Image: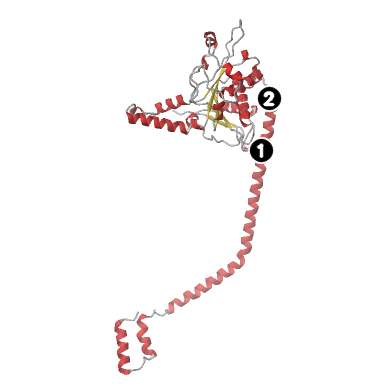
Amino acid sequence: MVSSKDAEIFREDARLRGTKLSAAERERLLKPYLPEPPSPEMKPKSSSNSKTRSKTKQKNKHTPIRTFLKQQIHRLIYVFIHLCLGFYIRISQTIAAVTDRVLAVTYYHHRSPELIARDVKGLSRLPEHLSVLLKLRKREEDALQTLMDETAELAAWTTCAGIPVLSVYERTGILKSYIPSLHKTISDKLALYYGSPSHQPHLRICAPHHTSYAPIHHTKSGSRAQKKPSLTILLLSHSDGRETLVDLTKTLTEMSQSGKLSAHDISTKLIDAEISELTSCQSTSSTSPSPPPLATSSAQSQNESYSSDEIEMLPSTLFTPIKPEPDLLIIFGPIVKLDGYPPWQVRLTEIFCTGDKTSSIAAGSEEVAVEYQGFLRALWRYARASFRFGR
């Protein structure tokens, strides 16, 4: 911007002479405000820039061929890796599927407790508490009956293998509403394995916040019941996980605020004890909840009071509290997905997935059938597993 002094000089000259400034005078007037002209030393740099530009242009003429070759080599390597990986996955799926079918034929149980006991006889150890994760197939019309049949099969295999406790996790918890019907379905399935009710093991079904259901089959007059093994089935659902912990937290908070419980008394042992009590079976009662419409009259008539002789012949394990944490968890599905399983129940649990994606040629279904060879492979894996609990 022109200074006020220069503007005043310009106006004074124009007033006195009445003529315009010459070109030299105008240049002299604007010279202080113009940038300095380039020096001679800067000229070689411009020439060097032109040389570098010419070199890059020459290089660009050769790079398209090299770039094309690199791209083709990369694509070839990419396709080769995918082919190798595809062959590996397909061969693994085929081997696993053939092995699964061979095991299904070789180790078929034929609904014989003796054969199942023979299959697990050579194992170094068996779980005291077995847990399974099942899914309700909502797309099927008879999804509930299919779920009950799978639970009954697992109950039969478990008791034949000599495992006293089986916990069944199903996310929706629909089995808790049909405990009498489930008891009848399992009893009918055990009849196919053991025969008459006098040879069947004592069965008890329980669930958190529910009374244990264990009706007694009366023996004929003159015949005394024999000591038989027992099977306890614990039904778990998604509500027994996070919701139980939230309810327990609210209860402890209210008790602490009301002065019924000191904050120093709230410890890990107390929380573990309360959670174990909430998620374990309650004492066996002679009265059962009213069965849903799916329950039959025969299930109602079975729920009768115990006599002194029957209580004497019942195994003691039927009334003792079960082990809260399972030793082995079997997931019948394509991937290891706990699906809301209570986290404090699986802190030291061996987890086995029967339906790995590489074990089926289909490998796309999220539903895997409950089969005996999967149950047996889980017991084999548990027997070979090593447990390191630390110091």
Please give left or right for residue 286 compared with residue 101 in the image: left
Q: Residues within 10 Å of mark 1 (few under 14, many from 20)?
A: many
In this figure, which residue is indicated by the disc labeled 1? 93
The x, y position of residue 23, in whole percent, is 39, 90
Residue type marked 1: Gln
Q: Residue furthest top?
A: 222
Decide if residue 376 is in sight here.
no
Q: Nearer the viewer, residue 24 or 59?
A: 24
Decide if residue 371 is in sight here.
yes
The x, y position of residue 314, in whole percent, is 54, 12
Q: In the rendered image of this protein, does residue 359 appear above or below residue 305?
A: below
Q: Quadrant of the C terminus?
A: top left
Instruction: Residue 310: name its quadrant.
Output: top right
SS class of the residue under badge 2? loop
- The disc label shown at residue 3, or none: none
Q: How is the image coloured?
A: secondary structure
Return the disc, 1 or 2, that comes first in the chain's sequence: 1
Residue type marked 2: Tyr
In this figure, which residue is indicated by the disc labeled 2? 108
Which mark is nearer the camera, 1 or 2?
A: 2
Instruction: Residue 155: name its quadrant.
Output: top right
Q: Residue at x 46, y 77 (%)?
A: 43
Please give left or right for residue 140 compared with residue 55 in the image: right
Q: Quadrant of the N terminus?
A: bottom left
SS class of the residue under badge 1? helix
Mark 1 vs mark 2, CA separation in Å:
22 Å
Please give left or right for residue 386 compared with residue 142 in the image: left
Q: Residues within 10 Å of mark 2 (few under 14, many from 20)?
A: some
Q: Residue at x 61, y 66 (%)?
A: 62
Q: In the rendered image of this protein, does residue 360 appear above or below residue 321?
A: below
